[in-house]
Image: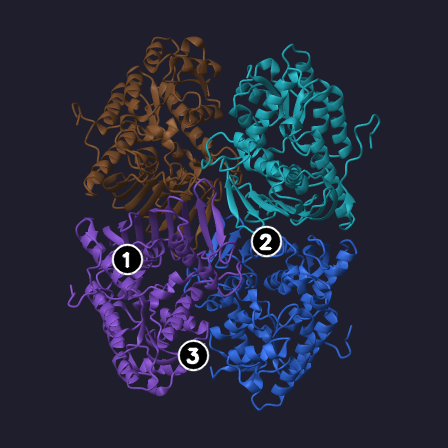
Chain colours: A cyan, B blue, C purple, D brown
C-alpha cells in the first residue's frame, strides 16, 4: 500500500458527530494519518482538540485559510482534506484546497448554489485534482450491489423509483436548544433548503447513482411543519429522470417513529430492489414471475465490488462506519493511482465526485424553485459547464 | 338478532373473486341469506350460478333491471343489494336499487363521475335509504383502531400522511389474456382513471376516514408504464387536507415485488401510526420521545370498537374476510335499526357511506384533471349537494 | 355439492372461543347446517344458546348422551359431530358418536391416554367411520405448502426441526379468575400435561405431519413456572424422529411478548423452510447455495393443494378461520365421498385423523414420563393397535 | 488518553478473518499501535505479513514463544496480546503471556479443558494480570443494554431463556476444501466439541453474562449431521441456571438459511427481551400487560453504558466491528487504570474475563459428558479454584 496518506480535516471539531465519523472511517483501514486540522470555528478549541487527536502543533491550525496556506507551503502537504463544516463554507474551502493542489472530500451538499458547485468542478478539472462528495451511504456494500445489478441489466429498464430520507429527529422545536440542529434551518448557513438539502440530498444522489440516470425535472412541495422554522422540514418531490424513470422522494425531519429513515425501492421491468439503511445488510430482490429473495451482504451471487466493500463474512452485521470507510479506502486508492500517473478520478472508483455534488445542488435549487412556484416542473439539468467561460 | 336479512347480489358471477369475497363475508356471521341475484352479464350463466348458490329459481334474475323490478314487487324483497359489477354500471344500478327502496352496498369507485355519485347521495337522502361503499379494508380491526386513536386525540394534530396501494400484479401486459385485468384500463368501463380508481381509491378513502379530514386539493402525476395502456398504471399524488395535513399517495400496478401493497403511515405531533394490509394484525405506534410499540390486534389498551371487530383472541391471525365481514355485520345492524325506526345510516356505524364514495370519486376526478394539467393543484372538495337543485 | 351436511356440536357453548371458531369455520364455505347441539355443561344454558344459533328445539340437547341417542334414532342424523369440550371428555363422547355411526371432528388432544385414543382408532376402523382431529393450524395454505414441498423432495433429507408453541397468555396466575384458563392446569380435566397438551400438541403434530416422520423418542423437561400450577406451563422437548431427523419443541404459556407463538423451522439437506402463525401468508425458503426466498400464499410456483386452500388471490391476508375452514371443507368432501361408496377417510384428504390424534397423545405421555424421569429418552411409538385384542 | 497502547498479536495471519477483525477493532478508537506479532504457524509467512502491517522487523516474530521471550525482555513490551489461534494452543500461549506479565485477550474457548482454563485464572490472579476472553458479541450496545436492564431489575426474576447460535455455513462437507472449516471438527485442534465450542459458546456465555446467573447443570444431545464429521455440528442443550432460570441452547452449523444465527430471548416475570445479531440495533422489549416495544440503539431511555458503547447517534446502523472495538476500548481503559495503580480487572469494565472463559469451557465439558451419557444432567459448576492447590 506504500505507506499511509496524510489527511487534513476542516471542521468536525469536538462534539461533532460527523467529524468523529470521518476520523473513525479514515482510520478503519489504516490508510491515513490525521496530519493536519482546522477543526473548529473557535481557533483555540480547534487547536486543543487537534493536539488531543495527535496532530502536530504546527499543523493544528487556527482556521481553514491558515491550514490551506500552511499545507501548500510544506514539503509534505496533506494528500486529502475532509471538509466537514456547515454547508455555506463548503465552496470557499473546497475552492482553496483544490487550487492549492489538495484533493478534497467534501460533505454534502457540495455548495449552496449550483453556480458555486460548478465552479469547483471546473477548478478540479483544470487543476487535475481529485474531488469527492461525502454521500457516505453509497459505501454500503448492498447499495453498491444495487448499482452493479442495475448496470448489469438485472433490473431491465427502470420504471419507477421511490426514495425516502425521512427521520423523526426534529418533531419538536429542538433547534431552540441544539445548535447542531439550529443551523440546518438557517438559510444563511444551510442555504436555500432545509431537510431536503440536509437529508434528502443523500437519497436524491443515491437513486441517480444506482440507476445511472440523472434527474431531469422536479416538481416539489415544501412544508414548514414545526412553527418557526425558516426552511422546510418536510418535502415531497416528484421526479422525472433522463432515462425515462419516474419517481418520488420524501425528505422529512418530522417523521416521528423513524429513527433514521433512508430507504428506497427501485422497480424495473425485469426486477425490483428495496433497501433501508437501518437494516443495511439485506436487499430485497424480486424478479418478474418470482418470489421476493433476500440478498444478504456477501451472499450467494453478490457482485465482487459489493463483496469487497465488506470487511467480514456475510451474516456479521456491518454498519455505517464501514460504508464511510469504503469511500476513504477507495479515495486512497484513487489518490495513490493518480500520483503514480494514472488518469483516474473519484468516479473511476465508483465514488460520488464533484459533478455528482453539483447535480445534487442543482436538484435542490430546482426543488426550491418548484416549491416556490406551487409544484411547477423545473429542470434539474446542469448547464454545459465544461467549456471555457461556461459560468451560468 | 331477529333472523337473517335477505341479500341480493348484482355482478360477482362465477370466477369473480370479489363476488366470492362478498358472499363469504356476508356468510361469516350468519346475518344474511343470499336470496336473489343477477350475477353475470351473461343471463344464462348468471342464472346457473345463482341456482348453484342456492338462490330460488324465481329470484335468479337474467339482469339487474329484472332483479330490481322483481324484488320491488315482492312482499319479501331483499334487504340489501351488493353491487359488484365493473365501475361504469355502479351508478345506474345503485340508483335503481335506492329508488326501489333497497339498501345498497356498492363496490368502489361509487361512480365514474362525481355528478353521478352525488345524485346517488341525494336519492338515498331523499328516500331515506342506507347506502355504503365497499371500502372493505376499513373493516380491519387495526384500521379501526387507528381511526379511534386519531379521534381520541392520541396522535395530536395530524401533520403528514403517506399512503400506498401499489401492487405488482400488472407488471406485464396481462390484460391481453385476462379480461379481469383488461377492463381496468378501458375508459368505457373503468371511467377516467386506471390504477388510481382501482386500487388507490381504497388508500385515498382510508386515510381521510382515519384522520377525519377530507382531501382539499390534489396535485397528480400519472404514467402509463406498460406500453399500450389507455389509463394510468402508476400515479403519484400530493395531497392537502382540509385540516392542514399534507401527504402523498402512490397507486401502482407495476410495483414488482409487492403482492398487495396497501400500506400507510400517519404522523401527528403527538404520535405516529403505520400499518400494512399484508400484516394486518400489527400496528406500529410511536409516541414523541418514546420507542416504537407494536400494537397487536386485541392487544393491551386497544379500542373496544377495534376489539369487537375481531372474532378470536389476539395472536390468531385474522385477514381480509374478517375485514369485509365487519362491513356486512355492521350494515346488518344498521338495516335492522333503521327498520325499527332508528335514525341511523351507514356512517352511524363507522361505515363508509355514499358521501364517502362521492368524495372518493371527486378525488379521482381532481387527480385526473391535475395530471392532465401537469400536476396543477385542483380542488377535490365536493360542491354543496344537499340543497334542492344542487346538481353540478 | 349436493346440499349442505348436518353438523352437530358438543361443547363450544356461549363464550367459548373455540366453539365460535368452529361454527364460523364450518359456515365459511356453506357446506354445513348447524343442526344439533349439546353446547354446554349446563343444560339450560346450552339449550338457550342452541336455540339462539337457530338449532331446532328438539335438537337442542341437554347433554351429549342425549344428543347421541337422539341423533342415532332420527332418520336425518347429523353427518358430523364436532367435539369441543375439555380434554377428559373427548374419549367418551367420540366413542359414543363413532359407535352411533357419526363422523367425528375432535378437538386436540384426542384423549388423555393413548389407550383411550387407540380405542377410538379401533372403533372407527371397525365401524368404518371417519374421524379427524382438530389440528386446525394444518389448514393454513402455507403449512400445506410445506408438507407438499417435503413430500415432493424439495427439502431433501430432513435433518433438524425446531418447533415452538410458546405464548405469553398465562404469565400471571390468571387461572384464579379465568375458568377458561383454570382447567388447562387441572389434571382431572386436562389430563397429565398442561401447556404441552394444550399448545405444544399442535406443534408436535404439525412437524410430524409436514415432514412425514413420526416421533420415535422424546426427552422432556417440564417446569411449573408460575407458583401454584399443578401441570407444567413450560416444556422443553428434544425429539428423535423415525426417519432420522432430530429436533426440539418448546411449549410455554409464560413466553411474555409472544401473543400466539406457533412457529417452526425445518432444515433439510437441500432446503429449509420457516413459518409462523402470526404472519401465516409467508414462508421463508432457502435452497443450499442460494439466498432466502419469501414464498407468499398463492405465489409463483406454489403447490395446487396450497393454492386451493386459499379463498382469495395472494397478497390479501388470510387467517385462522380460513385454516379451520379448510378442515371443514375437506371433511365435507370426505363424508360425501364416503357416502357415495368411496373408500376414503380423513387422511385421504390430507387431514389429521384419529391415528394422528393417538400419536399426539402418545407423545404427550412419553414426554410426561420422560420429564418425570429427569429427561430420560422414552419411546413415543404407538403399539400395533390394528390387531384384534391389541389393547395395551 | 495518554498515548496508544502497544498491541501484540499471536495468530490471525493473512487470510484469517478473525485476525482482520481484531486488528480493525483495535484500530477503531485509536487506542493501540500494533507493535509485535507472531501471526502465522508458518514463520516466514507470518513475518512477511507482520512487516506488511507495519510491525518493526525485530518484533515480527517467527513464533509465539519467540514473541513472548522477545517482548518480556524489551523495555517497551506490548501491553496486551491478542491470541487468535485455534483452540488447542490458547492455553499454552495465554499461560506464557500471563507469566511474562502481559495482559491477554484470548479467543474463545479459553482452553480445551476446564483444568487448563482454571490454571490460567490462577496465574492471572497470582500475577495480578488482566485477562479477557473475546466473547466479542457482548460489545454490542444493545446486548449491554439487556445486561443493564436485568441488573436493574427491569425484567424481574428470570424464568426462561432461549439462545441460539445456529448458522448454515457448513451444510455441506466444506471442510474438504476449507482448512478454515476443517480444524473446527478436528478434536486435536478444536478440543472435545465442534459447533458448540465454536459458535454455541458465544451464546452460552452471553446469556449467563446478561442474566447474571451461571449455568448449574446441562443436559445435551449432539449430532454429527454431515457424514464424516468427528465432532458435533448440531447440539441441543437444556440448561438450569444457578438462580432458577431454565433454558435451552441450540448450536448448529447446518441451519440452512441462517447466515449467522446468534439470537436469544429472555423471559422474566416482569418483562422479556429478544435480540438477534443480524439486526443488532434493535431489541424487542415487552412488559407484562403491555405491547412489545422496539428499543433502538441510543433510543429513549437506554442505559448510559449502552449509549456510550455506540459511536454515532441512533438510527445509523452499527455492527460487529463496533462490538469488538468496545472490548478493545474498555480493555485499554482497564490496562491504563491498572498501570496507574487501580485495582481493576476486565470484569470491572463489564468485560468477559478469564473466569467467564473457564466457565464457558466447563459448560462445554459438561455438555460433552452429558451428550455421551444420552442427555443425563451434568453439573457445569466450576470447582473452587481460588484456593492454593485447588487443581482439579
**Looking at the picture, does residue D130 appear above or below residue B369?**
above
Q: Position of residue C320 (x, y in %)?
A: 43, 63
For disc 1, the chain is C
Gap between marks 3 and 2 measured at Cα: 50 Å
- Which residue position holds label 2? B267
Q: Position of residue C313 (x, y in %)?
A: 53, 62
Helix, strand or loop under label 2 = strand
Q: Position of residue A316 (x, y in %)?
A: 45, 35
Asked where in the image residue C230 lies, by quadrant, the reply is: bottom left
Q: Nearer the viewer, residue C37 or D223?
A: D223
Gap between marks 1 and 3 measured at Cα: 36 Å
Mark 3 crowd level (few <14, some 14–19, many ≥20, 10 Å Cα): some
Foreground mark, 3 or 2, reads 3
Mark 2 crowd level (few <14, some 14–19, many ≥20, 10 Å Cα): many
Gap between marks 2 and 1 measured at Cα: 43 Å
**Looking at the picture, does residue A91 appear above or below residue D68?**
below
A268 relative position to D112: left or right = right
Q: Position of residue A145 (x, y in %)?
A: 57, 37
Q: Nearer the viewer, residue C388 or B223?
A: C388
Camera sees residue A219: yes
- Which residue position holds label 1? C196
Helix, strand or loop under label 3 = loop
Both on one chain, marks 3 and 2? no
- Which residue position holds label 3? C4
Both on one chain, marks 2 and 1? no
Q: Are marks 3 and 2 in contact (CB under 8 Å)?
A: no
Q: Are marks 2 and 1 in contact (CB under 8 Å)?
A: no
B280 relative position to B253: left or right = left
C317 relative position to D159: left or right = right
Residue at the image point whose x is 34% and y is 15% from the top: D64
Amino acid at each position: 500500500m506504500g505507506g499511509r496518506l496524510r489527511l487534513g480535516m476542516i471542521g468536525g471539531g469536538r462534539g461533532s458527530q460527523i467529524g468523529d465519523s470521518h476520523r473513525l472511517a479514515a482510520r478503519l483501514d489504516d490508510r491515513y494519518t490525521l496530519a493536519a486540522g482546522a477543526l473548529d470555528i473557535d481557533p483555540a478549541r480547534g487547536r486543543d482538540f487537534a493536539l488531543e487527536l495527535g496532530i502536530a502543533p504546527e499543523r493544528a491550525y487556527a482556521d481553514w485559510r491558515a491550514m490551506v496556506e500552511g499545507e501548500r507551503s510544506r514539503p509534505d502537504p496533506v494528500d486529502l482534506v475532509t471538509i466537514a463544516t456547515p454547508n455555506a463554507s463548503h465552496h470557499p474551502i473546497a475552492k482553496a484546497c483544490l487550487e492549492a493542489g489538495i484533493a478534497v472530500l467534501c460533505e454534502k451538499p457540495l455548495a449552496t448554489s449550483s453556480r458555486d458547485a460548478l465552479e469547483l468542478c471546473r477548478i478540479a478539472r483544470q487543476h487535475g485534482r481529485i474531488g469527492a462528495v461525502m454521500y457516505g451511504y453509497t459505501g454500503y456494500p448492498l447499495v453498491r450491489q444495487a448499482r452493479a445489478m442495475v448496470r448489469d441489466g438485472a433490473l431491465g429498464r427502470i420504471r419507477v423509483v421511490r426514495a425516502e430520507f425521512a427521520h423523526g429527529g426534529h418533531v419538536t422545536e429542538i433547534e431552540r436548544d441544539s445548535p447542531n440542529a439550529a443551523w440546518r434551518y438557517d438559510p444563511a448557513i444551510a442555504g436555500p433548503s432545509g431537510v431536503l438539502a440536509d437529508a434528502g440530498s443523500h437519497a436524491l444522489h443515491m437513486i441517480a447513482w444506482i440507476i445511472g440516470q440523472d434527474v431531469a425535472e422536479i416538481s416539489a412541495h415544501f412544508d414548514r411543519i414545526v412553527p418557526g422554522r425558516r426552511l422546510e422540514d418536510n418535502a415531497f418531490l416528484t421526479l422525472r429522470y433522463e432515462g425515462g424513470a419516474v419517481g418520488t422522494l420524501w425528505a422529512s425531519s418530522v417523521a416521528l417513529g423513524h429513527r433514521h429513515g433512508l430507504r428506497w425501492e427501485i422497480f424495473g421491468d425485469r426486477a425490483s430492489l428495496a433497501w433501508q439503511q437501518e437494516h443495511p445488510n439485506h436487499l430485497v430482490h424480486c424478479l418478474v414471475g418470482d418470489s421476493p429473495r433476500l440478498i444478504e451482504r456477501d451472499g450467494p451471487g453478490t457482485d465482487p465490488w459489493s463483496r469487497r466493500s465488506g470487511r467480514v463474512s456475510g451474516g456479521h452485521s456491518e454498519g455505517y462506519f464501514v460504508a464511510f470507510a469504503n469511500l476513504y479506502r477507495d479515495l486512497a486508492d484513487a489518490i495513490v493511482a493518480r500520483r503514480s500517473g494514472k488518469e483516474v478520478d473519484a468516479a473511476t472508483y465508483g465514488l460520488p465526485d464533484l459533478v455528482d455534488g453539483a447535480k445534487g445542488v442543482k436538484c435542490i435549487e430546482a426543488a426550491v424553485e418548484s416549491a416556490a412556484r406551487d409544484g411547477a416542473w423545473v429542470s434539474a439539468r446542469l448547464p454545459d459547464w465544461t467549456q471555457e467561460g461556461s459560468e451560468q
